[in-house]
Image: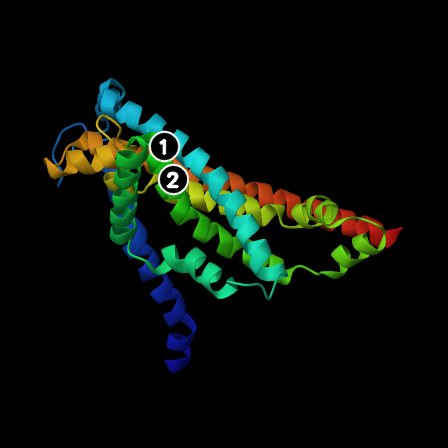
Amino acid sequence: MMKFLEKHLGKAWLLLVYAFLYLPLLFMVVFSFNSTRQDARFTGFSLRWYEALTRDSKIVEGFFLSLKVAAVTGVLSATLGTFAAFVLVRYKRFFGRTLFSGMVNAPLVMPEVVIGLSLLLLMVGAQNLLGWPERGMLTIILGHTLMGMAYAMVVVQSRLLEMDRAIEEAAMDLGARPHQVFFLVTLPNIFQAILAAFLLSFTLSFDDVVISEFLSGPGVNTLPQVIFGYARRGINPTIYAAATLLITTVTVVIVAYSVWVARQTRRREREIAAASRS
């Protein structure tokens, strides 16, 4: 009996954890196809709430705004995070390194409410002093980039720490300059990590509510903000449809990345095997 418990207890516990995390999402997806507004009973399959979703201009505009904000945030976060990770890994000693490391990592442990409030005060002060920027899409991107850059830096930093520096040193021995080594040797080797950082930042930006609430302006609302606003006024099955659309978008991005990584890994293994045979 003890052996049976030891063998299957871990699997059962893992199954319970997954059920706790994902059953509510499955419940919401199923009820987005409910034919009536009832929440406790599924009365029949219907696409009426998705049709209502397409007629809701706030949700449609919020969805496309979220896509644009997340895409720009992902690019900026991955770029800045890569440079920050490279500096921290490759340069062990420089003036202000401890302060720089602490500032880059601060958004990882700082509550989003505090980040959003501080950025709001900064943006308002800058607007009063310089007349720019006005709260809207740009300020949301800046706020999301601050948060996403920290996560992107962690992802890229872990890959840089694992990377064999001998290939960089070999390139420099062959006459390559530091910037050539970075773009021709280091960057291709950490590209998967950069892509993972982009997707992580994209996902965090796409479903963020707190920072967006602080930094958005009048008439500028992302999809999570619209969903949150509707939910405060009462349950509407259209919210389920919008949230299902949100989940689907994030899932497609993650699955596409996983498939790409798997194909790249198989291709690399075939190349290594072919090289060893020759």
Residue 260: x and y in percent read 58, 41
Residue 61: x and y in percent read 30, 23
Residue 120: x and y in percent read 26, 43
Protein image colouring: rainbow
Query: Can residue 26 be seen here?
Result: no
Describe residue 210's horizontal placement relative to residue 101 as left or right: left
Vertical relation: 178 (above or below) 95: above
Q: Residues within 10 Å of mark 1 (few under 14, many from 20)?
A: some
- Of 181 and 70, the residue lying toward us: 181
Vertical relation: 92 (above or below) 37: below
Q: Which residue is mark 1?
A: 138
Describe residue 138's horizontal placement relative to residue 170 as left or right: left
Q: Which residue is mark 2?
A: 142
Looking at the image, the residue that sits furthest to the front is 129
Q: Are marks 2 and 1 in contact (CB under 8 Å)?
A: yes
Looking at the image, the residue that sits furthest to the top is 55
The quadrant the N terminus occupies is: bottom left
User: Label 2 to label 1, Cα distance in Å?
Assistant: 6 Å
